[in-house]
Amino acid sequence: MQKINHLSFLRMLGIILPALFILICCKDKGTEPPAFKPGNRDYVWTVDTLKAGPGDLIWTSEFWGSSPNDVWAVGGADASDIAKWHFDGTKWTRDSSRTSSNIDAIFGFSSNDIWISESPGSRIFHYDGQLWKLFGTYSLPGYKYLNMNNMWGRSPTDIYIVGGADSVDGVSYKGIIMHFNESNWDFVKIPNIRIGFHLIRPDYAISNEYYILGTCFESTGDSVKIFKFDGKNLRLIYVGENGSMSFNLIGQDIFFTDSKHILTYNGIKFNLFRDFSDVGRPLGFLFGRNYKDLFMGGGIHGNCEVFHYNGIDVQSIFKLPESVLGFVWFMFLFPNDIFILTHDDWNPIVIHGVLKN
């Protein structure tokens, strides 16, 4: 073996030590939030009302889109041929295919790979870019109804649906989780928990882990619970009352909100990220592109606004029409577009914001 003399050894240290210093510094900085610019607020807004026909009732609950020229809005309606709507970049049109009138969840990976599920109901449908097709009908012994409320997937062969199952006697109920793995949807074996799950989002910091939000409905009062889920096991991390906590995926990070604060979770405890008490009104569900480009709806019936946090301050950027039913239901964001969903007494209202060049 060739010997290394003292001079060579010192030269090697001169290379290795700075490299180690760089690695250590990079590792430390990796725990810090990435540097984002304050979110832009200069939008051009348009407002569309989704109307099918006289007397038709539509209650749209969620968006999904592959691009600003390919956005789907789905929900409940008094007929299955008016429960799905599509935006092509210019106008909204109803999809008249008769799938379900009780659609509560939609998620996709491209314009020709989109899923929807029923709540209440037992069916899951898939869109191949041309047609919506029934993929399967599902049930649990001893339970009359399924509520498949929300879905999220890391890949086209790894998707979850969360919801609940109601018993035949109308008294017993439990949370359900379904998983799609390449060929079929299966129920995940979890303990019988008296809860209805209604939101799932991935924890990208930990491989194969998710956050799940649910509500326990009891005569003594409702309680909100948040779990960590690793594909097999559920771990309770939060219990609150009166809809006191929710969360959403912002970029690659999960942020929590209790209507006055934004919080983060480090695996052990919740930490305050931003206090919004000075806004003076409760803030709704949180949406955003990153932690310096966050959107929330806030207010009450006839006085509801869309608020924006750009990493510096909070401002109202759009006042909803006075006819809306009180708050923002859902938002869906692209790099330069935002779609906001609300309702009047009969119809969904879609507010579309496009950033100026």
Image: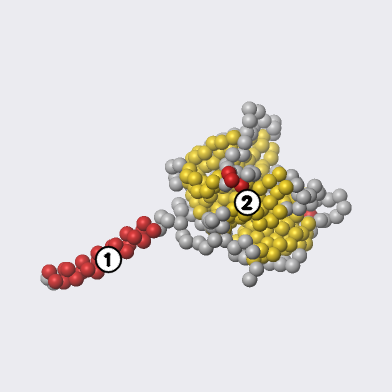
Ranked by sequence position, the earlier of labels 1 and 2 is 1
Pointers 1 and 2 in contact (C-beta within 8 Å): no
Considering every residue shown, the one lying at the far right of the view is 54
- Kindly indicate the quadrant of the structure image that contains residue 350: bottom right
Q: In this view, does 279 lie above or below 27?
A: above
Q: Distance between the residues labelled 1 and 2?
A: 45 Å
Q: What residue type is labelled 2?
A: Met
Q: Is residue 233 in view from this perspective? A: no
Question: Residue 44, how many percent across, how many down?
Answer: 69, 64
Residue that mark 2 sits on: 296
Q: Is residue 223 above or below residue 82?
A: above
> What is the quadrant of the C terminus in the image?
bottom right
Residue that mark 1 sits on: 18
Q: Is mark 1 on a helix, strand or loop?
A: helix
Q: In this view, does 29 lie above or below 344?
A: below
Who's the residue at 46% across and 53% down the image?
Answer: 205
Who's the residue at 32% across and 64% down the image?
Answer: 22
Q: Is residue 208 in view from this perspective? A: yes
Question: Residue 325, how many percent across, how many down?
Answer: 75, 46
104 lies left or right of 8: right
Q: Which amino acid does label 1 sit on?
A: Pro
Q: What colour scheme was applied to this rendering of the protein? A: secondary structure
The foreground one among 165 and 184 is 165
Q: Is residue 172 above or below residue 151?
A: above
Who's the residue at 45% across and 42% down the image?
Answer: 269
Who's the residue at 85% across and 55% down the image?
Answer: 53
4 lies left or right of 100: left
75 lies left or right of 335: right
> What is the quadrant of the N terminus in the image?
bottom left
